[in-house]
Amino acid sequence: MAIVDVKTEITGNVWKIVTKVGDEIDEDEPIMILESMKMEIPVAAPEPGKVAEILVSEGDTVTEGSVVARIEA
Amino acid sequence: MKKILVANRGEIARRIFRSCRDLGIATVAVHSEADADAAHVAEANEARLIGPASPRESYLVRDRVLQAARETGAEAIHPGYGFLSENADFAEEAEAAGLVWIGPTPRSIRQMGDKQRARDIAEAAGAPVVPGSRRFEPGELSGLAEAAEEVGFPLLVKASAGGGGIGMRRVDDPAKLEEVVEGTQSMAGKAFGDGAVFLERFVPKARHVEVQVFGFGDGGAVHLFERDCSLQRRFQKVIEESPAPGLAGEVRARMAEAALKLCRATSYRGAGTVEFIVDAETFEFFFLEMNTRIQVEHPVTEMVTGRDLVAMQIELARGTLPTLDQDGILSRGHAVECRLYAENPAKMFMPSPGPLDVLAFPDGMEHVRVDSGYRQGDMVTPHYDPMIAKVIAWGETRDEARARAAEALRATRVEGIRTNLAFLVACLEDEAFAAGDVHTGFIETRRGELLVA
């Protein structure tokens, strides 16, 4: 079991968190949805696994490159 | 009219303030907490904070905007584009509060906001709409061939209950029609619980051309020619121009006439835009929708006609607009507008907010206009749309306008965030664009070439 960092590629606000810790998710499945400049942009799992940690809350501001969640792959 | 409140932000707020100053009218800005230091706030005579960063809690809160107008003694509201500009309830409330609404009547906003109603009005007024057939219930195939012939090929078989591209199949060959209709009826029955389908003409290579209109509210109206806005990504426009390249004068004239019919039929008041989809091969055109506000791309029209559309809106609202005669409105040369976005073209045009450490536009270039929402040192926040500025250039010919726009963009410097600056230059200098081969799939099909450049 490896812990994989999930990073955001954009700066924006956390709009909706659509998973919770413990959820099994597939590769490319959205963990949360960000909102930036009138666009909704999903942050997807880089590989399949189990959501280990969610490091942000809805409404938070996140910056490009920051780790927003971790999955156990 | 001594004071106008602009219920907007960024470049369009500044643009409207400019016309206000020209007309000797004082200005009121409204702003969110995130925009406290924004350029539009600094520039207005007065400013009022109306809430937190999120538009839902500030720029879209009707009561707060109206309260700001009351407190500052503004006599009129200009909504700009986006936000509350096409909100009929807000227009009504503003008028009920004794304010002058610088825009069309709430009734017009409502009529055109309902896409089906707008289509019906356009059709009744004699503007061409995308040919479509009646419904064909599940298992019903009689009359299909005749209906298809009337609609024309290629066509789409669409599930009545579908939407957003789901339950939609393209048919090019009349021999395949029955099979596809039966299949779609069966699929739609299972998927939507309604197996009815209809046929609609499909335009494989489409252009987006729109006509700028200006109505006087009494059934009279003039047009200020067309704009081609085919270059889009994610349904957002990137480059606009006037006149539309390669469009015969006769087609342009018919399109303008169709737009005017719509204005006369609705006694349209003020600036508006009638959008058409144009078949890039056959030049057939169909009514798409009408936007009941000033458009982002209005400067290209101003550059070729020499008119100030915002000043016209204000003058109409205060009752001082001089009589306008269609014959007196002329289009000269060619204008191109490029939208500078805070985005990363290499990553599917993902937003790229951040600090504008450097923002410098060409200074004093002849026939170049820059409408910017930001100054050097400002922050582009993730709360609003990604447009930083519009760079507009005019030339005697399209080539001259293109070259001038590219020169202006090359002289533009942005540091601190990623932008589409180089991508815009690549578009302007692309050989297909230079040849006027524009269509709505342009950026998608030529992305490879455009990103390498």
Image: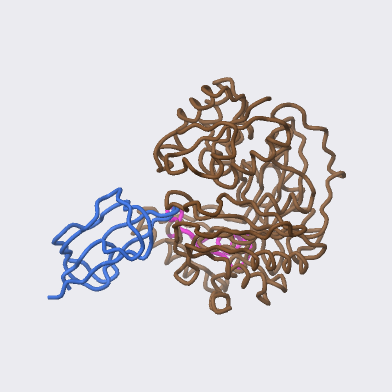
Chain colours: A blue, B brown
What residue do we see at 64% from left, 68% from top? Answer: B410
Q: Is residue B173 above or below residue B152?
A: below
- Residue at image position (79%, 50%) is B305
**In the rendered view, does B182 fall on the left or right side of B332?**
left
Q: Is residue B79 above or below residue B195?
A: above
Which is nearer the eye, B262 or B90?
A: B90
Give the mark count.
0
x 56%, y 42%: residue: B40
Q: Using the rendered view, name the quadrant where residue B359 is placed.
A: bottom right
Location of residue A39 in the rendering, given as x and y in whole percent from the top left corner: 43, 55
Q: Quadrant of the C terminus of chain B?
A: bottom right
User: Is B384 drawn above or below residue B204 in the view shown?
Assistant: above
Front residue of this view, candidates B356 and A55: B356
Q: Nearer the viewer, residue B362 or B71?
A: B362
Residue B443 location (% of width, % of height): 57, 70
| Residue range of the region highlighted in magenta in the rendering | B139-163
Q: Horizontal placement of B178 versus B129: left or right?
A: left
Tell me, yes or no, whether the highlighted magenta stretch contains residue B161: yes
Residue B145 at x, y = what percent? 58, 64
Residue B291 in magenta stretch: no
Q: Residue at x 68, y 25 (%)?
A: B1
Q: Position of residue B427 (x, y in %)?
A: 63, 70
Q: Is residue A47 left or right of residue B340?
A: left
Answer above or below: position of A71 versus B189. Answer: below
